[in-house]
Amino acid sequence: MNTIYLNEEQLSVDEFNSVCQQSLQQQAFPLAQGAERNVLIYQADSLISAAHDDRQAVLSELHRALSSGPGVFVVKGLYRDLAAVDRSSQIFEEILRDEAASGGGGDHFAKAGSNGRIWNALQKVAERDADAFIDYYANPLLALICESWVGPGYEITAQVNQVRPGGKAQQPHRDYHLGFQSNDVVARFPLPLQILSQYLTLQGAVAHSEMPLESGPTQLLPFSHQYQGGYLAWRQPAFIEYFQQHAIQLPLSKGDGLFFNPALFHAAGNNTTADHIRTANLLQVSSSFGKTMEKVNHVKVLLSLYPALRQRQLETEQRNAVIAAAAEGYSFPTNLDTDPPLGGLVPQTQQALLLQALKEEWTEVHFDQQLSEHVRKRQA
């Protein structure tokens, strides 16, 4: 068996089952108040008190919970000041109404328009109400949780998700980075890089409404992040069926926080209520390591190279090597309002745009126009 590059034929539901059937050893997590269905439950006040005594011990335990532990934990009372949560919720509703009126809306892992989604809620709230932003993110415990997984220097993005009455569940999935890529792309990454991917982001959700089970709180499969082939597996029917048979849900109260390893199989649930809107602020916290050492103006590079590239008769592999060196090869970060993932989970990359231009023999003027539009769509 190739242990560096995986393919779909090497995946095994039986092995996946062995991983997911682990039992939580709660004694290994002494700061937890308890556990429910293999999910660790922490009290915000207890974590704050423990951090005053030994901050590193808290950081260590939370990190272990997301790595060697079940991969998920709940913090009850993450927001004691519910006024800050409600104020942000009011702004969310304003944004949703404004964007619905302008025809916006899109989603990952669910049919567009079936639920409510705000992309880049962090910036949009800051622009509408600076005090609301400050009150919301002036939360040292949230900062400590972020640091426990991705270390200092992290960057937060936020996307609001509403599951409305009658709203259907998402398909089970893993999350950003590799969870957004097709299996063809995932298979090109060595397995150690696939494992590394989960250490580059933290997934969080702050409950902005009460979340009884019937309202569709996140479905979770504890320990599933430990299955190494999971980024290739989550789309396969056998693994989807396993998730649907074994996933668990926990009710949350307004102000609670749910945090999980992005490699954990998860999905928003069905909202079977007649009148309850389930609202969560989804936090995606990125490691500082996902950045280059130097800032390169790739637009200037491409505009300089394109005339020569059109004239050169390069072999395909030579051409692709030049494109890889000259253009950005990753879809993110982008503005998902103006650069949506149409036809898949990821928008067009700069490299794909350049390849299209060369294949279709665009003029220099047309390439300049399309490259400028590509830049414009990605700006926040």
Image: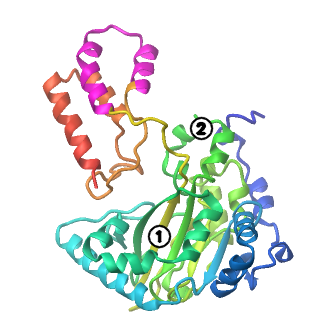
Q: Quadrant of the N terminus?
A: top right
The residue beneath circle 1 is: 282
Q: Which image quadrant for residue 158?
A: bottom left
The residue beneath circle 2 is: 187
Q: Quadrant of the C terminus?
A: bottom left
Q: Kindly state the secondary structure of the residue where label 1 is placed.
A: strand
Is 208 included in the stretch rendered in magenta?
Answer: no
Q: Residue furthest top?
A: 313
Q: Earlier in the sequence, mark 2 or mark 1?
A: 2
Residue in view at x 52 percent, y 54 percent: 176
127 left or right, relative to 69: left
Mainly helix, strand or loop, the magenta region? helix
Q: Kindly state the secondary structure of the residue where label 2 is placed.
A: loop
- Can see residue 184? yes
- Residue contact between numbered discs 2 and 1, judged by CB atoms under 8 Å: no
Please tell me whether residue 140 is drawn above or below residue 203 in the rendered image. below
Which tag is nearer the camera, tag 2 or tag 1? 1
Q: Which x, y percent locates residue 297?
A: 32, 33
Q: Please name the amino acid that badge 1 sits on.
A: Leu
Please tell me whether residue 378 is drawn above or below residue 49 in the rendered image. above
Q: CA distance from mark 2 to mark 1?
A: 28 Å
Q: Nearer the viewer, residue 203 or 267?
A: 203
Tag 1: Cα neighbours inside 10 Å, few (<14), some, or many (≥20)?
Answer: many
Q: Which x, y percent locates residue 264?
A: 63, 62
- Can see residue 269? no
Range drawn in magenta: 298-325
Q: Which x, y percent locates residue 10?
A: 72, 41
Q: Please name the amino acid that badge 2 sits on.
A: Ala
